[in-house]
Image (tube, rainbow, N blue to C red):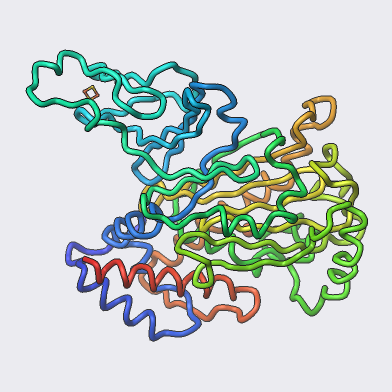
């Protein structure tokens, strides 16, 4: 299907008008303008995406000096590299001469970063080491041409970046998840699998879909059979309370069940959303697997199966669902106005060996299929919203409450951005 875009008459004043109309409208889904406008997309990137803390990689992606991995976001490419001082840097993959991409392979190892165009060469910390024959240019100073960089925070082995040099700190908000996330010892974990699911839809459709489980009962039969999150809170309250009561004893982690929620409008600073909550699995399921039985050795400090799973938000676009024996990380990365990468990473305990301690197919079974189901419904959603006769309907007050919170934050952020010009 061809996805429509806004007309050539799109402008900042139209965006202001749409934003003010949207903010007066309470409790209904966003107008299709926000998914179709190229202007909106550019504003979102600049004012929201590039100012948010986003999961970029795991420390095991760059274990040795000179190891790098690319993180592609929007139209940009960022080099996550371990430098000579053993620090992790996030460098813009844009040469300071005439802008060529420096690294083209998704991952690799190098002693210096060499631009393939005219051979300007950078140290691993991004400083310019040599610029061929540029001594002929009077006043040329290498110190003026380091690669641009993004902020980096490493927490529990997870590398987060923020392209805004003035971004507020993320370590403080993350430290509220010490017990809940620390239980899995992600620093020592191993990436068992990573997959990118490209969806031909605006990034907000993908994120909005993740932020609500109203669709779980209908779109995800396997998930819904296993996870109480698919039901209204009051229907599963007793079961979840029982699990919370036994969780510290069974897992051996005090506080693993504690709830913390500071996301979007309630976040401590812009783009620093964090939340943790432990929800129940239905009886007979110890983990998120086909038969409900463990698919890998217990992770980190976890000592048993409490019938729960840790649900986390780590920044506005990154999430985790952590079972006692494996963890699944999700992030939603805009790659164009109508293209999104849904990246999924499966983690197992650091010393688990494929084929011995886990079977990869069994490990990824649930979330691979669930993501394919999501890809289908998101595409359907995008097509419907993009059609001329779409009129936004009401959000569900419980199931879609987080969506409303996101919409509020989103509209507020965009309104400020438009005000800034
Ligand atoms: S663009 Fe990189 S050296 Fe010229
Ligand atoms: Fe889903």
Please give the name of the residue rendered at 68% of the width and 63% of the height, measured from the top-left corner.
216
- Give above or below for 134 relative to 95: above
Which quadrant contains ligand 1? Answer: top left
Q: Is residue 216 left or right of residue 356?
A: left
Please give the name of the residue rendered at 74% of the width and 56% of the height, measured from the top-left corner.
180
Residue 235, image x, y percentages: 81, 77
Q: Is residue 16 left or right of residue 361?
A: left
Q: Quadrant of residue 400?
A: bottom right
Q: Quadrant of residue 186?
A: top right
Q: Is residue 317 left or right of residue 290?
A: left
Residue 192, image x, y percentages: 69, 33
Q: Nearer the viewer, residue 91 or 297?
A: 91
Please give the name of the residue rendered at 50% of the width and 32% of the height, measured from the top-left corner.
87
Res 358 seen here: yes
Please give the name of the residue rendered at 53% of the width and 56% of the height, measured from the top-left corner.
315
- Give above or below for 120 relative to 19: above
Residue 70, image x, y percentages: 45, 32
- Give above or below for 33 relative to 195: below
Residue 280, image x, y percentages: 82, 63
The tally of labels here is 0
Q: Nearer the viewer, residue 53 or 72?
A: 53
Of the 4 image quadrants, the one containing the C terminus is: bottom left
Res 2 seen here: no
Q: Quadrant of residue 387?
A: bottom left
Q: Is residue 48 left or right of residue 107?
A: left
Single out the residue that lies furthest toward the top. Answer: 133
């Amino acid at each position: 299907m061809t996805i429509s875009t806004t007309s050539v008459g799109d402008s900042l004043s139209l965006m202001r008008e749409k934003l003010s109309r949207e903010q007066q409208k309470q409790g209904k889904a966003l107008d299709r303008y926000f998914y179709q406008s190229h202007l909106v997309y550019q504003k979102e990137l600049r004012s929201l995406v590039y100012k948010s803390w986003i999961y970029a990689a795991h420390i095991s992606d760059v274990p040795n000096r000179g190891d790098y991995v690319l993180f592609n976001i929007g139209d940009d490419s960022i080099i996550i590299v371990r430098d000579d001082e053993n620090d992790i840097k996030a460098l813009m993959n844009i040469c300071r001469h005439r802008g060529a991409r420096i690294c083209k392979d998704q991952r690799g190892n190098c002693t210096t970063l060499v631009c393939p165009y005219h051979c300007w060469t950078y140290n691993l910390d991004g400083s310019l080491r040599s610029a061929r024959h540029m001594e002929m240019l009077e006043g040329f100073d290498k110190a003026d041409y380091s690669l641009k960089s993004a902020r980096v925070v490493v927490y529990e082995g997870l590398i987060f970046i923020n392209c805004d040099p003035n971004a507020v700190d993320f370590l403080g908000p993350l430290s509220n998840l010490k017990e809940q996330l620390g239980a899995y010892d992600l620093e020592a974990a191993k990436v068992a699998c990573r997959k990118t699911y490209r969806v031909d839809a605006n990034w907000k459709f993908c994120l909005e879909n993740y932020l609500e489980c109203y669709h779980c009962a209908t779109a995800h039969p396997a998930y819904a059979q296993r996870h109480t999150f698919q039901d209204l809170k009051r229907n599963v309250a007793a079961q979840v309370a029982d699990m919370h009561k036994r969780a510290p004893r069974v897992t051996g982690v005090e506080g693993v069940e504690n709830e913390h929620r500071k996301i979007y409008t309630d976040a401590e600073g812009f783009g620093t959303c964090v939340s943790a909550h432990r929800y129940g699995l239905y009886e007979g399921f110890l983990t998120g697997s086909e038969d409900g039985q463990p698919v890998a050795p217990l992770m980190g400090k976890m000592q048993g199966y409490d019938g729960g799973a840790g649900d986390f938000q780590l920044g506005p676009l990154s999430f985790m669902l952590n079972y006692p024996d494996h963890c699944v990380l999700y992030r939603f990365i805009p790659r164009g106005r109508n293209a999104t990468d849904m990246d999924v990473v499966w983690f197992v305990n650091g010393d688990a060996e494929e084929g011995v301690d886990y079977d990869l197919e069994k490990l990824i079974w649930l979330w691979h299929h669930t993501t394919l189901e999501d890809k289908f419904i998101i595409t359907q959603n995008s097509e419907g919203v993009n059609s001329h006769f779409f009129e936004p309907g009401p959000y569900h007050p419980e199931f879609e409450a987080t969506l409303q919170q996101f919409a509020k934050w989103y509209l507020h952020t965009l309104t400020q951005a438009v005000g800034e010009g």
